[in-house]
Image (spheres, rainbow, N blue to C red):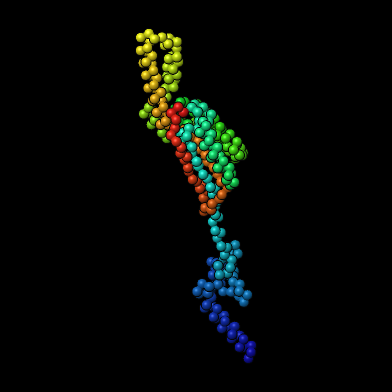
Amino acid sequence: MRKSCFFILQLAACIYSTHVYSADSTHGYVVSIYGHAFKDAYGKCIHTAYYDPDHDTRRDCGNVKEAASAPIAKKAAIETVTMSDAGDVLFNFNAATLTSAGIADLTAFSKKLGAQSDITGVTIDGYTDAIGSSEYNLKLSTSRAVAVKQVFIKNGIPSTIITTHGYGEKDVKVSNDCIKKYGSDDTNLILQLEAKLKDKNYKSRAGKIVKETKQLEQKLNSLQSKRNDLIKCTAPDRRVVFTIEHNRQIEESTDNSVESASTEIASPPINSDQE
């Protein structure tokens, strides 16, 4: 009698499972008609003959790998500072020697940088206006960037983190319009007139010489005035650009961009006798 009852119970269970559960051949699991995985007494999902452990996964069976969240990229904090002749004149005309105002400004700036312990790199880029030849301006801008570097080193910025470049008249913003307005540089002609006026022949007080002298002086004054206006107009293009990289890192998702802040240091008006 007991054996008969046990057989009947087994048969009922088989009939029940036939109606409630089915083999999911696509995913290799035995599932209910409601789509739930059938588990054994130990809580493990029942596999079918089609089960492939490399491809068959179910979240309710605990073998679904969660997608890794996108890594949070880091971006360096970068600051850009520009000093130009639109403020204090940094360099003596046509030279890479700094003016007293330029030395003062750069000394104060480099000391400010030296007080920031998180700075990992400083790039010094020199630029000129478009007055003169491109080749000469390129050399001049390079020499000026190196001169600025020396001031930085003198004030405690390690030379190992400083990089210099000279770009000459690249990326001028106002020079072309200024040249259209005031003409090209007349330095050579001005020098010729100055030399001529110093000639001993013009020391004479004879009427003809006096008249010619006045004419030369008037022409010289006109050229010098126009040249001074040209130099003043092109002042923003004569600049030094500092790119300061900080060790401070900011979280940003998936891209490699940098945080940047741009500052242009303004100072009193330019002197007319500087490039």
Q: Position of residue 230 (x, y in %)?
A: 40, 28
Residue 208 lies left or right of residue 91; in this view the side is: left
The quadrant holding residue 199 is top left
Total residue callouts: 0
Residue 251 seen in render:
yes
Q: Is residue 34 above or below residue 72?
A: below
Residue 167 seen in render:
no
Q: Residue at x 37, y 19 (%)?
A: 218
Q: Residue at x 60, y 36 (%)?
A: 154
Q: Residue at x 57, y 35 (%)?
A: 151
Given residues 119 and 48, the one toward you in this image is: 119
Q: Position of residue 84 (x, y in %)?
A: 47, 35
Given residues 2 and 212, the one toward you in this image is: 212
Q: Quadrant of the N terminus?
A: bottom right
Given residues 205 and 143, the one toward you in this image is: 205
The quadrant holding residue 18 is bottom right
Q: Position of residue 115 (x, y in %)?
A: 58, 44
Residue found farthest to the front? 205
Q: Is residue 217 above or below residue 118?
A: above
Q: Residue at x 53, y 53 (%)?
A: 251
Q: Position of residue 157 (x, y in %)?
A: 60, 39
Q: Is residue 66 above or below residue 242?
A: below
